[in-house]
Image (tube, grey):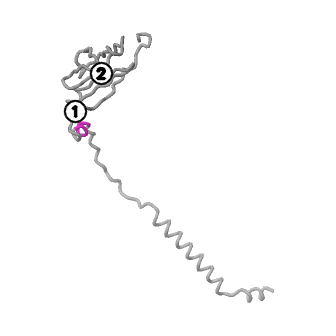
Amino acid sequence: MLRSLSTRIAPVPALATVAAAALLAAALWSARSLSAPQPSAAVATAPRAPLDGAAGANLFGASPESAQNNAVQLLGILSFDPRHAAAIVSVGGDAARVIHVGGTFNNDMTLAEIHPKSIVVERHGLRREIALPAAQNPNAYVR
């Protein structure tokens, strides 16, 4: 019976199966050895230079000094009547001033609009909204 079984199995398909298994093993071994990281010496990197924020401002034609001098801080809003509203502003850390709607300050800025918690400042045709800072003591807020 054993002899009849071996004569029935042809040697060619069995050899093809063994060859395919050997090829698969070789392919897996080469893929593993090629994808494994090679040990390398530690590479010393130079420390990065700190970022310079002034370079970005100069990119668009503004100097950082002028940006600080034109910083508008809204300190308060006086709005008894919408047509006669005013805002208390400080420019570049200077003393606070009261500016009425349509009034100019800092030679090139105009107070365009006053809202309940913000103002709109126009400079060279561009409008920017500036909000009131959050109250540190909510009980001191008077409307």
Label 2 – label 1 distance at C-alpha: 17 Å
Q: Residue at x 28, y 22 (%)?
A: 111
- What amino acid type is highlighted by mark number 1? Pro
Residue 56 among those drawn in magenta: yes
Placement of the N terminus among the 4 image quadrants: bottom right
Q: Residues within 10 Å of mark 2 (few under 14, many from 20)?
A: some
Q: Nearer the viewer, residue 120 or 35?
A: 120
Location of residue 61 by image quarter: top left
Q: Residue at x 30, y 49 (%)?
A: 45
Q: Nearer the viewer, residue 33 or 106?
A: 106
Q: Is residue 72 above or below residue 137?
A: below
Q: Residues within 10 Å of mark 1 (few under 14, many from 20)?
A: some
Q: Nearer the viewer, residue 85 or 87?
A: 85
- What amino acid type is highlighted by mark number 2? Gln
Location of residue 87 by image quarter: top left
Q: Nearer the viewer, mark 2 or mark 1?
A: 2
Q: In the image, residue 71 lies at what x, y percent?
A: 26, 25
Q: Which residue position holds label 2?
A: 73
Residue 94 among those drawn in magenta: no
State which region is magenta.
53-57
Q: Which residue position holds label 1?
A: 64
Q: In the image, residue 118 lies at what x, y percent?
A: 36, 22
